[in-house]
Image (tube, coloured by chain):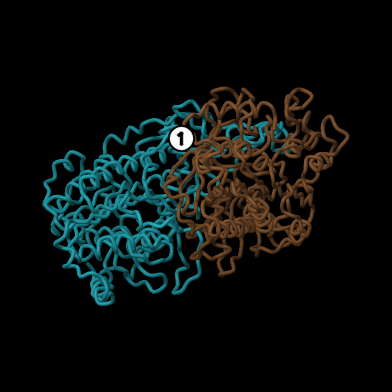
Chain colours: A cyan, B brown
């Protein structure tokens, strides 16, 4: 843990005289919080996935959760008392969840403008004797998982080679020199994770653990080993990892492969109006992309599923533990596939989340005092649009100005999914409030409407922190 | 009431032997259901309105509702056992709410393919002795309000002049010859309302009451008068209308004017890329529409507000009534303004809904046994997208391929709202599940997730029907 956070934690303990003493809860029954995050899993994504996976009249496991609310997403300009920005990214939203503090886009557990490190729920829980875990289908250094245990001013500073200057396609897009250890900072994200006290970290991103650690001859992975992590790289090794050791699982170089894809890997495509339609929009016709089914992604077989990682994390965190734990689980590529305009990819990752939820709920059935929360960090671009059009009675061609997919559902319908927030190679996020679900433990704790940072308070209070 | 519906109601009474006898509840305390529909009021619309009206950290009255769920929208092809269509219109969705039956797009309280009339909650409640009311900011003949008390195969058959053949801009877009009275049907929508037993009908659409009624020398408005309606046309006349008379208020020719508009009535506009950007998307720059505030729409002063209509309806329905009532209230132009790409218009109509809700909740405070439900009928096109872009670090112009508005919020931020479902003059609906809210009476009745037609069952059961 870095010094700034240690100091902040100490201050926190003093600042809350009315809070239960940590020692008071230590001897009680173990308590757990499992926070499941569907990255970009807004109401459009949930509906698209439900229609495909269960049919329009069907139900996801998500839908059976007894408590439901909406979470308003907040972010601000990157300065002290910055004005609101109405659409967030995964860095600031994970910071809201992990710390209860609204920050600016791109930041991980640091304050907007002030750049101060903010203690996370994982650091606070650890200090109180809880075990902690992070599971994600992204790189574990990606914004959502990393915000729970790392502090940087810029999300792209994922490893020691990237901390000083980050480039993308030759374009300089940022850097975190002030976060380097030589400058008194906590270092790059992967190095912070390797030096952290987190008990279980599972996901992708091995490439961020191969560079040399800052100020060391060791790779970041070796630094993690020297810090007590058992580092595993396959589903088989994961299943055999002994409990009682801290566990770092890195199952792919970067983001883990997704479960589903369009036929032959197809993404959404632009409707193609005929020549005559370019003359006048009431003339000619338009060719839509051919409809397709979703298919298994062959690469997916090489990695553990989100459910397998969840099961492993639960086993390791619960073994011989009379205090309890905090675990966050992210299905990351609902968002990433939506950025790439790949609806089948997103659908498969909602399915992965629903399966991980089944594990969490089964655990909660066996272990009282387990609060299971499911939410999204922000809304995304995909929209389910009409096919045929609402205006099909008009004898003119109508079509989306963006990218669309026509997906054949198993029940025999055809869904049209639209991506049209930007002309850029990646879709933008959107700003709608997102769903928040809880198991019965959340009754009376999770209100029908809240602001995203309040989820941090609910979790912290539940653990008596 | 038409013969088909009378027969269906009779059948219904026989078909449910376990249901409480209507007479049993008549002597109890009055019971009320108030169903408030925000047309197209999905999570994006609610968030956009909240950010503008209350600030990103603020709360609408809606947000304070103690019960919250999500409602999955359903529609099917226009044939018996038709396959699912994944995006609905306001006719089939209002039919789901009013009758509990999933039908095809364009239909009002008639079955897909079979074209049979389906009894509505208003007809069933009337038959049981309840008073009934319909309030809308649309024409009262528009799909959402009309589905509660009229039965046609095609939503555009709003008046006797339109029932045989409907044209729009010279294009034949439908007709309901089989619904004409001369063919054994119940007639055009306005004529059905004029001949209905509904106690209070308030909204726009006077132009649909000026044609001659089918088979009569009377205008539809005069037919309504002869059927016992007090017909009023101004807010003043509305406020003075004596209770004890049935009331038909028609306050504008068609849709009622909305409360707010963009500066100088501006709608969203297309971003204008520079010439160089047409050469390559990484070159040149883009001009976005100028940002603007929302302004009062001067025409709005000429009509009663949704709250005034709601207050009047509640007064008339509750006066000397020991049985209770069913009232549906629609804020229609959240949807209509979104079709026209006018975010300020939609924001003002969410505000109107929130004010009408205040009246409904105040009534419920004074009158126990009042279930207040708020929901949307379907999702809409508008998306809150990032400004600045998430990709602002890249030195290339990025912009929506659709239409956007930049709205200056009172708290000093700027929201970018995107409309990009279609190149057509009107945006499409979208398919996401929509919010469902209830007052405390809904606890235990309104689950966290349901299919839209189940809302009909909740209302029917609450009234003991």
Q: Vertical placement of B157 versus B199: above or below?
A: above
User: In terms of secondary structure, where does tag 1 sit?
Assistant: helix
If the image is split into quadrants, where does the N terminus of chain B sit? top right
Q: Vertical placement of B243 versus B228: above or below?
A: below
The answer to whether residue A421 is visible is no
The answer to whether residue A161 is visible is yes
> Of A258 and B306, which appears nearest the observer?
B306
- Residue B166 pos. (x, y %): 77, 32
- Residue A320 pos. (x, y %): 11, 52
| Left or right, residue A241 beside residue A415 | left
> Of B251 and B133, which appears nearest the observer?
B133
- Residue B236 pos. (x, y %): 78, 60
The residue under label 1 is A51
| Left or right, residue A462 beside residue A64 | left
> Of A360 and B17, which appears nearest the observer?
B17
What is the crowding at mark 1: few (fewer than 14 residues within 10 Å), some, or many (at least 20)? many
View extreme (right): residue: B217
Would you identify the image quadrant in which residue A80 lies? bottom left
If the image is split into quadrants, where does the C terminus of chain B sit? top right
Would you identify the image quadrant in which residue A347 lies? top left
| Left or right, residue A324 beside residue A188 | left
> Of B383 and B23, which appears nearest the observer?
B23
- Residue A130 pos. (x, y %): 19, 60
């Amino acid at each position: 843990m870095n010094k700034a956070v240690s100091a902040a934690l100490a201050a926190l303990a003093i600042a809350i005289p009315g809070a239960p003493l940590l020692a008071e809860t230590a001897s009680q029954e173990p308590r757990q919080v499992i926070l499941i995050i569907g990255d970009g899993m807004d109401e459009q994504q949930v509906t698209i996935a439900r229609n495909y996976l269960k049919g329009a009249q069907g139900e996801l496991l998500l839908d059976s959760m007894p408590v439901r609310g909406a979470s308003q997403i907040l972010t601000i300009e990157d300065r002290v008392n910055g004005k609101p920005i109405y659409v967030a990214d995964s860095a600031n939203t994970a910071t809201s969840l992990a710390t209860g503090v609204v920050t600016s886009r791109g930041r991980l557990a640091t304050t907007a403008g002030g750049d101060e490190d903010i203690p996370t729920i994982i650091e606070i829980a650890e200090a109180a004797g809880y075990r902690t875990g992070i599971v994600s289908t992204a790189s574990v250094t990606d914004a959502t998982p990393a915000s729970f245990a790392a502090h940087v001013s810029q999300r792209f500073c994922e490893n020691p080679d990237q901390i000083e200057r980050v480039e993308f396609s030759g374009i300089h897009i940022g850097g975190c020199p002030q976060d380097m250890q030589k400058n008194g900072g906590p270092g790059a994200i992967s190095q912070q994770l390797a030096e952290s006290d987190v008990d279980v970290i599972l996901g992708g991103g091995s490439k961020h653990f191969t560079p040399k650690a800052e100020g060391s001859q060791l790779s970041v992975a070796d630094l993690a080993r020297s810090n007590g992590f058992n580092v595993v790289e396959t589903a088989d090794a994961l299943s055999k990892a002994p409990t009682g050791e801290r566990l770092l699982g890195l199952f792919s170089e970067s983001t883990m492969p997704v479960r589903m894809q369009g036929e032959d890997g197809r993404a959404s495509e632009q409707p193609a109006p005929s020549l005559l339609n370019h003359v006048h929009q009431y003339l000619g016709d338009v060719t839509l992309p051919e409809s397709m089914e979703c298919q298994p992604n062959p690469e997916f077989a090489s990695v553990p599923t989100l459910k397998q990682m969840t099961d492993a994390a639960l086993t390791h965190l619960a073994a011989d533990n009379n205090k309890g734990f905090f675990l966050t689980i992210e299905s990351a590529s609902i968002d990433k596939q939506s950025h790439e305009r790949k609806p089948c990819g997103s659908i498969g990752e909602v399915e992965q989340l629903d399966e991980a939820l089944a594990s969490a709920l089964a655990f909660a059935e066996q272990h009282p005092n387990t609060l299971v929360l499911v939410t999204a960090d922000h809304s995304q671009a995909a929209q389910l649009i009409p096919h045929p059009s609402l205006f099909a009675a008009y004898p003119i061609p109508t079509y989306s100005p963006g990218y669309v997919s026509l997906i054949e559902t198993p029940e025999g319908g055809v869904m049209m999914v639209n991506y049209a927030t930007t002309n850029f190679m990646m879709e933008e996020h959107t700003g709608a409030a997102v769903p928040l679900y809880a198991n019965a433990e959340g009754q009376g704790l999770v209100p029908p409407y809240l602001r995203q940072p309040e989820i941090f308070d609910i979790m912290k209070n539940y653990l008596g922190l």
